[in-house]
Every structure is written in C-alpha cells, then in structure tokens.
Amino acid sequence: MSSQKIKTALTENKTVRVGASVFILITGLGVAMLGAGLILWWRKLTESTFRSLGLYKPNNWIKTILMGIFMGLLIKFVFVSLIMPAMGSVPSASSPFSFLKGNLTNALLFSIYVIVVGGFCEELVFRGFLFRQAEAWFGKGKTTSLWMVVIGSLIFGLPHIYQGGFGVIQSVLVGLIYGSMYLLNKKNLWMVMIAHATFDLFAIYIIYHDWSLYMNELFL
C-alpha cells in the first residue's frame, strides 16, 4: 500500500485510525523505540504537528532543562530512600540491573540506552501520543486529562514487569508524577523527558556504585 493510501485511510477511516493507534501503543509497550518511530511516521502521514505530541519549544530552555534534572533527581531520591523502603522493597542481589555494578562500560552504554528509550521514546508513547489520541477520541477537558494520567501510568507500568512487583508499582507511581508534570507544563514533553532520563541515570549511578542497600536504609 502506498503512503498516500495509508494517509487517506488514517485521516478518513475512523476504524483504521483507531486500529492504527492501538497497534502503535501495543508496539510501544513491547519495543518503545519502534513505537516511537511509528508515531513519528504516523505524524508525518497525518500531517499532525509536533506540538500535538508535546514536542514544541518551551518558553525557557534553561529553566526546562534545570527543572527536569532537578525533578528527576528528586523523584528517584524520594522513591529509593523513602517510598519503596516504606513499602517493604529491599534491593536484591539478583536484580536485572546487576550487570551495571562496577562495570563502567555497561553503565555508559546503558546510560545512552535509557536517555533514548526511557527519556524520549517511552515519554513519546505513554504521554505524548496517548494523551493526543485520547483527546482526539474523547475530546479535550479536565476529565479526559485526569483519566489519561491514571491510565497512562498503569500502561507505563506494564513494560517494567521484568523488574518484579515492586518495580511495576514504582513505575506506575512515577508514571502518575510524569503525567501530572506533563499537564502542569502545558503538555510540553521536554521537561518530562529530561526528568525521566535523569531518574534513570541516577538509578544507574546508584547501582554502578553499589549504593542500593545504603540508599534503601538511609532513613528507615
């Protein structure tokens, strides 16, 4: 099928449009980078704006970057030292991220991965695209936005099931924060993307230095 036919189907056929959106979200659940790629292709075919996906220039880049870094560090610190320990989560020697301990090469390569996949791709899928499609289907409004914060965070937790029950819970809770940040920041994704990437980078730093247990017992 030619690009023109796909474009026509996406813009004029509601069933195709909904089906394509669901397919993209499911793909994003499995492979965030592929899902993000499909979203950018979909945007081009449908002639949607980058702004509709939350990708537009913020009023102040420096403030956006600094606030994103601050929020990412703060969220990770609060979760690793207070919230997760209070819920009974204890660092395990069999963590799926144990390959990062003391291994600088693995830590650096994984840092690039989380910036691209976690910071950019996951946020584009679970915040930018999901919110945009919800508004297209159900209309703009506070009710739709609030539901999307909740639903988006629940869906965001699914790809993290490999981290175990506590990992999923943390992802859902953090997803609620990211979704709220997205709304409070006038649906601009950049601060949320930076916060997400910083959260993951801080997590890598902690694991690399084998500080997980120390952070877990810092206050409790």
Image (cartoon, rainbow, N blue to C red):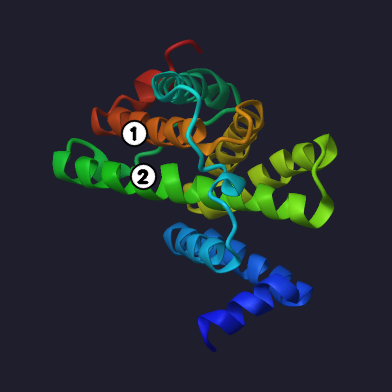
Look at the picture and state if 10 lies above or below 162: below
Residue projecting furthest to the top: 219
Give the residue drawn at x 76%, y 39%.
145
Q: Is residue 67 left or right of residue 17?
A: left
Rendering coords of residue 104 (x, y %):
15, 38
Q: Is residue 5 left or right of 44 when viewed as pictured?
A: right
Question: Residue pushed farthest bottom?
Answer: 1
Q: Amino acid at mark 2?
A: Val
Picture quadrant where residue 97 is located: top left
Q: Are marks 2 and 1 in contact (CB under 8 Å)?
A: yes
Residue to which mark 1 is pinned? 201
Label 2 and label 1: CA atoms lie apart by: 7 Å
| Residue depicted at 23% across the width and 37% down the height | 101
Q: How many marks?
A: 2
Image height of 125 relative to 201, above or below: below
Along the viewing direction, whichever of 91 and 11 lies nearer the viewer? 11
Residue at (35%, 42%) from the top-left corner? 115
Res 48 quadrant in image: bottom right
From this view, report whether residue 50 is shown above or below residue 17: above
Residue 102 in the image, given as x and y percentages of width and height: 18, 35
The earlier-in-sequence mark between 2 and 1 is 2
Q: Position of residue 55 (x, y in %)?
A: 51, 43
Write the residue at 82% across / 49% down: 139
Give left or right: position of 45 versus 197: right
Asked which secondary structure carries label 2, the reply is: helix
Tell me the amino acid under the disc marked 1. Leu
Q: Which mark is residue 94?
A: none
Residue 147, by quadrant, is top right
Q: Secondary structure at mark 1?
A: helix
Q: Would you name the residue on which mark 2 appears?
A: 114
